[in-house]
Amino acid sequence: MDPVLLSRIQFALTVGFHFLFPPITIGLAWLLVGIEYYAAFKKSAVCESIARVFAKLLGLTFAIGVASGIVMEFQFGTNWARYSAFVGDIFGAPLAAEALFAFFLESSFMGLYLFGRNRVSKRVHWFSILMVALGSTISAFWIIVANSWQQTPAGYTLEGGRAVLTSFGDAVFNPSTLQRFFHTISASLTAGAFFMGGIAVIMLFRNPASEVARKALKIALVAGFIASLSVLFPTGHLHAEQVARTQPEKFASFEGLIEGTTHAPMIVFGIPSDSPEPSVSYRIEIPSLLSWFAHGSADAFVKGLKDFPPDERPPFSLTFISFHTMVGLGLLFIAVSLLGVLLLWTKKLFASVWFQKIFLLVSPLPLIASQFGWITAEVGRQPWVVYRLLRTTDAVSVTVSAGEILLSIILIGSIELFLLIAYVFFTLKIARSEVRQ
């Protein structure tokens, strides 16, 4: 058994599980900011009832997210000691800022929001959910700062085999931070909107006359359409341009470009293969579009995988499949939410049970798309854990055996499976208990 591979599997398991919950928390919190505003300042009884339902779901999601995040962070010291030593001086400030400012802001006001209804004024209560949304967004920013530094290191010098911070501003606003942050927030708003819409559909199936469910579905469709569009453009486009500039081998891998060329085609569909050399068969492509997409000109040269040494290329098939699955799902979200908005506009939404069933099936998929986005970003960075500075094989702890890692994978996986089942159970229970509204 390879301890490096097992450590990567364990990290993927814990981070992947944790990353199910922050997108819902961020997206749902911002939706509740608007809903609670109408409840508090426009005296909307329906919006207040919606807020009561989804406040419970927000609290549940936040709790599971916090619990799963603790396990994730412990791994840096157990399985990735050499990585922690290398990046410790860089990551100390942003992670401290995330804990001291963002997390405490979010968690403190979460308590006031969940337990303060009818105990504090409506203005204070609305302010509490605004602070929760702001705290969760700031928290995401600092986490993305740390991860983006791994993708595009800046503001550092190497001393004694470790990275030492020389410019806090350059490290925070490294070449990929803002593009990745806005893309992630757009994806989180999409996840939150589709989550709200899926719950609303469940409520409608139990009580088709529920005004709470009807209003929640309307809000979710409009918000989901706007957010899913923003994931594609401008945030997705800007992020792809950034990757093309700063991590060209990752860009070539997820776009399936084997040979560097001008007028590079964009592959819409293809079946990738890693053996004996990276290749894509059954290609459906649009000529010259990739050159324009990456550099704003069809004449621009785009590097292919063969322009890089074999030991510096990311795993091709997994990166390609993850990226194209993410993009395909993103287009699906735009299409489904647009259809819902059109049905809402023509006053056919609540008579179209077929659409409600489709939306319910699609509603959890933004979380899957986020997972594929994370896989694209992290696998596409390989073989580096810190891009072109520290290889993944050189980052693991030397004192943890493969057997110990395997045992921890089994234990952590079992706990996370239990938590996931409990989360789904209580989410459905909350949705079904509110059909009287």
Image: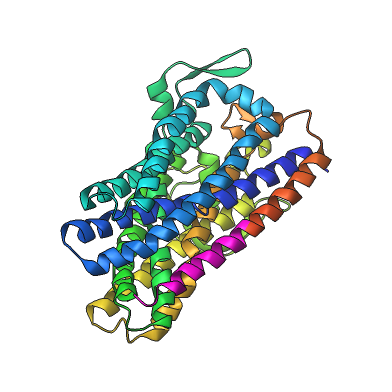
Q: x, y (%) of residue 301?
A: 44, 42
Q: Residue furthest left?
A: 42
Image: 431 above or below 2: below
In the rendered structure, the answer to whether residue 296 lies left or right of residue 384 reads left
Image: 395 above or below 188: above
Q: x, y (%) of residue 186?
A: 37, 52
Q: Nearer the viewer, residue 59 or 283?
A: 59
Q: Considering the whole magenta stretch, tell me its main secondary structure.
A: helix
Residue drawn where x is 65% and y is 49% of the image: 13
Q: x, y (%) of residue 180?
A: 42, 42
Quadrant of the frame with the N terminus: top right
Q: Residue furthest bottom?
A: 351
Whether residue 119 is visible, yes or no, is yes
Q: Residue furthest front?
A: 119
Quadrant of the frame with the C terminus: bottom left
> Residues in magenta?
419-437
Residue drawn where x is 80% and y is 40% of the image: 404
| Residue 429 lies within the magenta run | yes
Q: x, y (%) of residue 34?
A: 26, 56
Residue drawn where x is 31% and y is 62% of the image: 223
In the rendered structure, the answer to whether residue 387 lies left or right of residue 435 reads right
Image: 273 above or below 406: below
| Residue 386 lies within the magenta run | no
Image: 280 above or below 129: below
Count of residue discs: 0
Q: Nearer the viewer, residue 382 or 183?
A: 183
Whether residue 287 is visible, yes or no, is no
Q: How is the image coloured?
A: rainbow
> Quarter of the image holding residue 401?
top right
